[in-house]
Amino acid sequence: MALFEILAIVLGGGAIIGLASHFLVEPPRARQLLRRAPRRMIDAFKEGEAAKIVGTLSYLGEPLRTPLTGRPCACYEILVEEYSATGGMGSWEVVIREFKGQDFMLRDETGLAIVSPEGAELEITLDSQTKSGTFHEPTVRETNFLKSHGRKGKGWLFNKTLRYREGVLEAGEFVAVLGQGVNEPDPDGADQVSGYRQGPPMRLRLGGSKKTPLMISDAPETLR
């Protein structure tokens, strides 16, 4: 099933608008699409097909380290929110949103796929939260992260009230990926070739483009 058909099933008549750019697909909708998209086993995924796979994540090479907690991961999402009591109605405003990811492996009971998360819509569970404020100085990690985005933890007189939320995709975790698959030679399978007429072993790689958005999530409802 092509991805535009998946979008049409989930979104009805508004699907064509959503195809204009994958940046128009906000995280809540990404979660909805992942939840409703048809699931494929990796060994049944066809070249050029757009569908969902679910598997266990493992790293390709050295993992990333998150700026706030230092946790190893393949992808992370960080939200920094500032509390404002303007007008007597307190509210949290997102002032920094950072995503970062690198290629990782996803394995189900039938095989292994490589996922390239560049440009993906990530819907990651934000399972770490800290705060800084009037009586709580930002940590060194928090201060450095704010500086990397041109911000400070202190206002004119007092520390700003900030909330730091972080989520990761880490080794051993179940992850859902919706994207378009292509077959590529498997560099780790060269020793499996038994004759000169036999082609190199292939592996599946999932990626995305503006017309074929890539969506990645560890939300429980997307893993079915």
Image (cartoon, grey):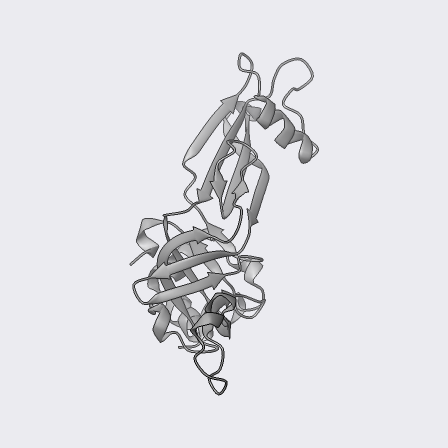
- Left or right of 83 on screen, residue 13: left
Q: Is residue 35 among what the camera can see?
A: yes
Residue in front for this viewpoint, 120 or 134: 120
Q: Is residue 203 visible?
A: no
| Residue 5 image position (x, y, % from top left) | 42, 75
| Badge count | 0
Q: Camera-side residue: 100 or 190?
A: 190
In the image, residue 31 above or below residue 97? below
Position of the C terminus, as image quadrant, is bottom left
Position in image of residue 104 (x %, y %) = 48, 55
Q: Quadrant of residue 87?
A: top right
In the rendered image, the quadrant that contains the N terminus is bottom left
Residue drawn 41% across the image and 66% down it: 11
Q: Residue at x 50, y 47 (%)?
A: 75
Outermost residue on the bottom side: it is 197
Q: Is residue 141 left or right of residue 179?
A: right
Q: Relative to residue 146, is residue 38 drawn left or right? A: left
Residue in the foreground of this view, choosing between 118 and 33: 118
Residue 128 location (% of width, % of height): 43, 33
Which one is nearer the viewer's eye here, 75 or 151?
75
Q: Residue at x 36, y 48 (%)?
A: 173
Percent across and percent down for residue 178 are 43, 63
